[in-house]
Image (cartoon, rainbow, N blue to C red):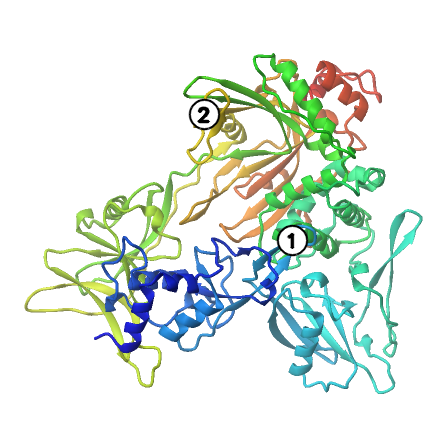
C-alpha cells in the first residue's frame, strides 16, 4: 500500500519540474560559473548510489521505468554512510570523486528530498559552500573537503579542540569560534597565533583575511593568547619564537631571524603577516641542497616536484646566481607577473643555503594556488600536473620575448624535414625564449595521414616533457563473494582476474575456474543499503562495476530463486515508510515447495597470492610512444584536402632533445566507472640512456643521458604518497627526499614500480657549474641556421662525441 506521502512524491517525481528543482544549477562537475550570487550558494552531498536508487524508484530514466513505484526499490532515508569515515558523522572519506561517489544538490533540491524521504537517523546534512579560488584566474568551486584546524589556548596547548572551516571563512570567524570554545569574554584582549613545526609561531593579525589567503592548511594548530592585566603577553611559554623578517638589502631579499626567550616580553604590532615567511632553522651547516620540505597537508606531490627541479643543475644555478632577476617579465599576459619565478627563487635559495635541514614552502604554495586554483586546496594532486604548471609558469615569467609576434603556421607541403624543422624552431624562439626553453624544450615531428584522400600533413612541434604510455593492463581484479545454495556452506571471498573490456559472463567463467561452480549456474548481484541494488545480465559490461561495489555471486539451482531482505520493526520512526528498517546483507534462496531457508552466513576471506609483476624497459615505452596510431572518433583531425574531420593515422617522432629530458610515465588512467593505476615495473637506466636510436634527425650524433632525479608515487589512484630520489650536484651522491626527511640512497633503490617522473641530464651538459657548454646565442645560431653544432666558447677542443652531442639540443 503506497502512503499519501509516497503518492505525492511519486506524482511529483513524474514531472520535469522535479529534476529542474533538484538539479538546479548543478553541472557535470563541482566547478561553477561565477555570478553575483555565487557566494550565497550551498551544495549538499548525496551518495551517488542512493541517488541512483531514487532515480530507479521514480522511473527517471526512460529505459528503466519497469520498477517505478516498486516498494522493493524504495530508496528509504537518504543514506550518506558510504561517504563518511567510520564513527564520524561529518568527516568525509578521502579522495571521493564528484558524480562517481557523490552528487551535488542545491539547497531547494536537498530540502525536497529530505521532506520526502528524511535523512538516515544519526546522520547530518553534508553542506558545502561555493568558494572562489585563484587570484588572477578566478573560478568558483564547491569546497567538498573542509580545512580541519586544531585550536588551543597558550596556557594549555595539550587541550586541543578540532573544528572544520571553509577556506572562505575569515580569521575573525575562527577567533570567534575559539572564544566560544574556551569561554573567553568578548571584552578580553586576545591575539591569535599560527603554530607549526614544533615551536615556531606567527601572528594572525588580519581578521578579514580568509583561511585561503592566510595559507592555513589541514591540521594546522592555532593558539589563542590572552593579554595579562598589565597589557603584556606570555608568548614565552614557547621555547623559541622564530620570525624570518623579509628586508630589502640592495636588490636581493635577505632573511633575518631572532628569538624571544623573555617570558614577559610582548611583541610590537605587526604589519601584513603575508609579508613574513617563517621557518624553523633546524640543524645548521647542512650540505647545500639536502633540505627537506614540510608537508602542509597532502602537499607531498608538490614537495616531490620541487626536489626534482631543485636537483636539476642548470636551472638551480640560474636562480642561485640571480640571473633570473634581469629576465623577469612582469608584463607578459600569459605569465604570473614574475611572482612564481620570484617565489621559486626564494625557496631554492633557502634550500641551497646550507642553513636548514628543512623549510616550509608555504609562501610558494600560496603563490601557486593564486595562479592555479586547482592547487590551492590541500587535497592530493598529481605531481606531473604541478610540474607542467611550474615549467610553463617559470617560462612565461622569464620569457625574454616582451612582445610576441603573430606567426602563421605552415605545413611541410613536401619540403625537406630539415628545412621545416629549422623553420618551426625559429618560429618557436620568436615567441618563446627563456631558461626553460634552453634547458627543457625539444622538438617532435608529427605525421598525420588522411584515410580518405591519403593527404600527408607533417608538422614540427616543441615539447617540454615526454609522456610515455605504459603497456596497458588488459585485465583487472574484482573482489566478489560467492554464496552457495547449501545453507551450511559459508560465503567465500574471491579475487577474480577478468578482462577490462569484458562482460558478466567473463566474471562467471573466471570464478567458475576458482570455485568449481558452473558459470551458467551463477547469479551476479550488486548489494547496496541492505538490498539488491542490481541483478546483472550475462551480457552486461564489467566496466559498470566500480571499485567500492559489493558484488555477490549466488549459486543458481533448478528451484525458484527469491530475493530476501532483512527488516526489523522500528518504533517512533519518521524515516521508515513501513515501520521497519533494513539491516544486514540480502541474499538469494532456492525455495522448494515444502521448505524455505533464510539463514545469514558468515564471511570467510580466502588467502590470495598475486602473480609476479612483469616489467618493461624504458625503451619499450619510447617505442610505444612512436608507434603509429589511429585517432579516436572523439578527437578526429580536420583534413584540409577533404574539408572534413577524419580519423587519421598519427605518428610522433623525436627530432631534437633538450639538455634535460623529463620523462613522464603515464601510470594513471581514467574512465567513467573506474580509476586505475598501472604499477608495472619500468626498468630505466641510471646512466648512459642512449636516445640516438630514437632521433630521426640525420644530423644527430650520439645522445646519452644520465639520471639526476625521480619522482615516486606509492599507493593507488586518488591517494598515496609522493617522494623523490635526486643526485646532489655538489657531491654526486644520491639522496631520498620524503617531505621534511632527507636520507642517503643507493642506486639499487632507485628503479622501482613507484617511479613516476624521470629527470635525465645529457652527458655533454654535465660540468662543474651544471651549465651546458654552449652559450645561448651561439647555440641558437647553430641550430636555427645550419643544424651544425659549433665549438664551445669554454673549450674549443671538445672531443668528437661531445661536439656531436650538441646536435641533440635544438638541431633542426
Judge by depth and name the residue closer to the eye, 135 or 780: 135
Residue placed furthest toward the right: 250
Q: Which residue is mark 1?
A: 138
Q: Secondary structure at mark 1?
A: loop
User: As displayed, is residue 15 above or below residue 190?
Assistant: above
| Residue in the picture at 24% in, 62% down | 490
Judge by depth and name the residue closer to the eye, 591 or 703: 591
Q: Which residue is mark 2?
A: 648
In the rendered image, residue 683, in percent from the top left (x then y), is placed at 53, 34
In the rendered image, residue 585, in percent from the top left (x then y), is placed at 29, 67
In the rendered image, residue 174, in percent from the top left (x then y), is placed at 68, 73
Q: Going by the image, does 566 lie left or right of 592? A: right
User: As displayed, is residue 86 above or below residue 781?
Assistant: below
Q: Quadrant of the N terminus?
A: bottom left
Q: Going by the image, does 381 lie left or right of 570? A: right
Q: Are marks 1 and 2 in contact (CB under 8 Å)?
A: no
| Inter-mark Cα distance, 1 to 2 | 37 Å
User: As displayed, is residue 152 above or below residue 556?
Assistant: below
Residue 152, quarter of the rendered image: bottom right
Neighbour tally class for label 1: few under 14, some 14-19, many 20 plus, Cα within 10 Å: some
In the rendered image, residue 480, in percent from the top left (x then y), is placed at 31, 54
- Does any portion of residue 732 appear in the rendered image? no
Q: Going by the image, does 549 lie left or right of 281? A: left
Q: Secondary structure at mark 2?
A: loop
| Residue in the picture at 36% in, 42% down | 500
Disc 1 or disc 2, which is closer to the eye?
1
Amino acid at each position: 500500500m503506497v502512503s499519501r506521502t509516497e503518492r505525492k512524491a511519486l506524482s511529483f517525481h513524474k514531472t520535469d519540474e522535479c529534476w529542474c528543482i533538484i538539479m538546479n544549477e548543478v553541472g557535470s562537475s563541482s566547478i561553477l560559473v561565477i555570478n553575483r550570487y555565487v557566494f550565497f550558494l550551498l551544495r549538499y552531498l548525496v551518495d551517488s548510489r542512493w541517488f541512483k536508487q531514487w532515480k530507479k524508484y521514480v522511473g527517471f530514466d526512460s529505459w528503466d521505468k519497469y520498477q517505478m513505484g516498486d516498494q522493493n526499490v524504495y530508496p528509504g532515508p537518504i543514506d550518506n554512510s558510504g561517504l563518511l569515515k567510520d564513527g564520524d558523522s561529518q568527516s568525509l572519506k578521502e579522495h571521493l570523486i564528484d558524480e562517481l561517489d557523490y552528487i551535488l544538490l542545491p539547497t531547494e533540491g536537498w530540502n525536497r528530498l529530505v521532506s520526502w524521504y528524511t535523512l538516515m537517523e544519526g546522520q547530518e546534512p553534508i553542506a558545502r559552500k561555493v568558494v572562489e579560488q585563484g587570484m588572477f584566474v578566478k573560478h568558483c568551486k564547491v569546497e567538498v573537503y573542509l580545512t580541519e584546524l586544531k585550536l588551543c589556548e597558550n596556557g594549555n596547548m595539550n587541550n586541543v579542540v578540532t573544528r572544520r572551516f571553509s577556506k572562505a571563512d575569515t580569521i575573525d570567524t575562527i577567533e570567534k569560534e575559539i572564544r566560544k570554545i574556551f569561554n573567553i569574554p568578548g571584552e578580553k584582549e586576545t591575539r591569535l597565533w599560527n603554530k607549526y613545526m614544533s615551536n615556531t609561531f606567527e601572528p594572525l593579525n588580519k581578521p578579514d583575511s580568509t583561511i585561503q589567503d592566510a595559507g592555513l592548511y589541514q591540521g594546522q594548530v592555532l593558539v589563542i593568547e590572552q593579554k595579562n592585566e598589565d597589557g603584556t603577553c606570555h608568548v614565552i611559554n614557547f621555547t623559541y619564537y622564530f620570525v624570518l623578517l623579509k628586508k630589502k638589502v640592495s636588490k636581493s631579499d635577505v632573511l633575518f631571524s631572532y628569538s624571544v626567550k623573555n617570558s614577559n616580553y610582548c611583541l610590537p604590532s605587526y604589519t601584513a603577516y603575508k609579508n613574513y615567511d617563517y621557518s624553523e632553522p633546524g640543524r645548521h651547516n647542512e650540505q647545500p641542497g639536502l633540505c627537506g620540505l614540510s608537508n602542509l597537508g597532502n602537499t607531498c606531490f608538490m614537495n616531490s616536484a620541487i626536489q626534482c627541479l631543485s636537483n636539476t643543475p642548470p636551472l638551480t644555478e640560474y636562480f642561485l646566481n640571480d640571473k633570473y632577476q634581469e629576465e623577469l617579465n612582469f608584463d607578459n599576459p600569459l605569465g604570473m607577473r614574475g611572482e612564481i619565478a620570484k617565489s621559486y627563487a626564494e625557496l631554492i635559495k633557502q634550500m641551497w643555503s646550507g642553513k636548514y635541514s628543512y623549510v616550509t614552502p608555504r609562501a610558494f604554495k600560496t603563490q601557486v594556488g593564486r595562479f592555479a586554483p586547482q592547487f590551492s586546496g590541500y587535497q592530493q594532486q598529481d605531481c606531473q600536473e604541478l610540474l607542467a604548471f611550474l615549467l610553463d609558469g617559470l617560462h612565461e615569467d622569464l620569457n625574454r620575448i616582451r612582445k610576441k609576434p603573430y606567426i602563421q603556421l605552415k605545413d611541410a607541403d613536401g619540403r625537406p624535414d630539415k628545412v621545416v624543422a629549422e623553420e618551426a624552431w625559429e618560429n618557436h624562439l620568436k615567441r618563446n625564449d627563456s631558461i626553460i626553453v634552453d634547458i627543457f624544450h625539444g622538438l617532435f615531428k608529427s605525421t598525420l595521414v588522411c584515410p580518405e584522400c591519403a593527404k600527408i600533413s607533417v608538422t614540427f612541434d616543441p615539447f617540454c616533457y615526454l609522456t610515455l604510455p605504459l603497456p596497458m593492463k588488459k585485465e583487472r581484479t574484482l573482489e566478489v563473494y560467492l554464496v552457495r545454495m547449501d545453507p551450511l556452506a559459508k560465503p567465500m571471498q574471491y579475487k577474480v582476474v577478468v578482462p577490462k573490456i569484458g562482460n558478466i559472463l567473463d566474471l562467471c567463467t573466471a570464478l567458475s575456474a576458482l570455485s568449481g561452480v558452473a558459470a551458467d549456474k551463477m547469479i551476479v548481484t550488486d548489494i547496496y543499503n541492505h538490498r539488491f541494488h542490481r541483478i546483472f545480465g550475462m551480457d552486461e559490461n564489467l566496466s559498470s562495476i566500480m571499485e567500492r561495489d559489493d558484488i555477490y555471486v549466488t549459486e543458481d539451482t533448478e528451484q525458484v530463486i527469491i530475493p530476501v531482505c532483512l527488516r526489523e520493526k522500528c518504533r517512533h520512526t519518521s524515516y521508515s515508510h513501513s515501520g521497519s528498517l533494513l539491516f544486514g546483507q540480502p541474499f538469494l534462496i532456492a525455495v522448494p515447495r515444502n521448505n524455505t531457508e533464510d539463514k545469514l552466513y558468515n564471511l570467510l576471506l580466502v588467502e590470495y597470492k598475486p602473480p609476479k609483476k612483469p616489467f618493461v624497459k624504458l625503451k619499450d615505452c619510447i617505442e610505444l610512444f612512436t608507434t603509429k596510431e589511429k585517432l579516436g572518433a572523439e578527437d578526429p583531425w580536420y583534413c584540409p584536402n577533404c574539408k572534413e574531420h577524419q580519423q587519421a593515422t598519427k605518428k610522433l617522432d623525436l627530432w631534437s632533445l633538450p639538455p634535460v629530458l623529463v620523462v613522464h610515465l603515464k601510470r594513471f588512467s581514467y574512465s567513467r566507472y573506474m580509476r586505475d593505476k598501472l604499477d608495472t615495473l619500468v626498468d630505466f637506466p641510471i646512466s648512459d640512456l642512449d636516445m640516438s636510436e630514437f632521433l630521426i634527425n640525420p644530423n644527430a650524433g650520439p645522445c646519452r643521458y644520465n639520471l639526476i632525479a625521480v619522482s615516486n608515487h606509492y599507493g593507488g589512484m586518488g591517494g598515496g604518497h609522493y617522494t623523490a630520489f635526486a643526485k646532489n650536484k655538489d657531491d654526486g651522491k644520491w639522496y631520498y627526499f620524503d617531505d621534511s626527511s632527507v636520507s642517503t640512497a643507493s642506486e639499487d633503490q632507485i628503479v622501482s614500480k613507484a617511479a613516476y617522473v624521470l629527470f635525465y641530464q645529457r652527458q655533454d651538459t654535465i660540468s662543474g657549474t651544471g651549465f651546458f657548454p654552449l652559450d645561448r646565442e651561439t647555440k641558437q645560431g647553430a641550430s636555427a641556421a645550419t643544424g651544425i653544432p659549433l665549438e664551445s666558447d669554454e673549450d674549443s677542443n671538445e672531443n668528437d662525441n661531445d661536439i656531436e652531442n650538441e646536435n641533440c639540443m635544438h638541431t633542426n
